[in-house]
Amino acid sequence: MAVAATASVSYALPQLNGAILAKNMDRISFANRITSYQPLDAMHLVLVADEKMNYLLSLTDMCHELRFARQIGVTHSENTIYAGFDHILADGQECSINRIQAISPEMAQRLRP
């Protein structure tokens, strides 16, 4: 039985006067409004909904296929994505969503590699 190491790395969010510019959320409602995504590294990606709402997703473990995946999907329940329950699917690799944070389009642009 193989055991995967859990990374405890947290993505460095931009700050303004010491305040992190993100709002923790437990879900994303209206998942059908997601129009694009941007992988940041093996544990983080940004989902874009209607070009106005951006969400930084932090994954529970490394998702090695994320940055190079040809297809990315997301599980959801009744059109809602839940942290701690749903998953990102990257070329067949299932990656658990640990945290969801609402971020501005400007912040999403700053986070992109």
Image (cartoon, helix red, strand yellow):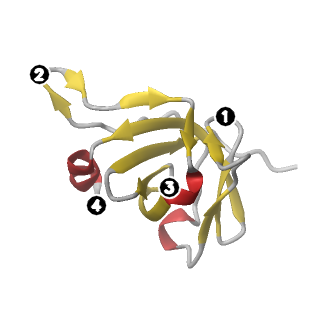
Mark 4: which secondary structure?
Answer: loop
Q: Which residue is mark 2?
A: 17
- Describe residue 68's horizontal placement relative to residue 97 as left or right: left
Q: Which residue is mark 3?
A: 42
Vertical relation: 81 (above or below) 26:
below
Picture mark count? 4
State the residue at coordinates (45%, 65%).
Answer: 35
Mark 1 belongs to which amino acid? Answer: Gly
Mark 2: which secondary structure?
Answer: loop
Q: Which residue is mark 1?
A: 84
Camera-near label (4 vs 2) is 2
Mark 1: which secondary structure?
Answer: loop
Vertical relation: 90 (above or below) 98:
below
Sooner in the amino-acid sequence: mark 4 or mark 3: 3
Whether residues under marks 4 and 1 lie with C-beta atoms below 8 angstroms apart, the answer is no
Crowding around mark 1 (Cα neighbors within 10 Å: few <14, some 14 to 19, many 20+) is: some
Q: Position of residue 61 (x, y in %)?
A: 61, 44
Q: Quadrant of residue 22?
A: top left
Mark 3: which secondary structure?
Answer: loop
* Circle number at residue 113: 4
Camera-near label (3 vs 1) is 1
Sooner in the amino-acid sequence: mark 2 or mark 3: 2
Q: Could you tell me how far apart the alpha carbons at marks 4 and 1 are, in whole angstroms?
A: 26 Å
- Describe residue 22's horizontal placement relative to residue 15 as left or right: right
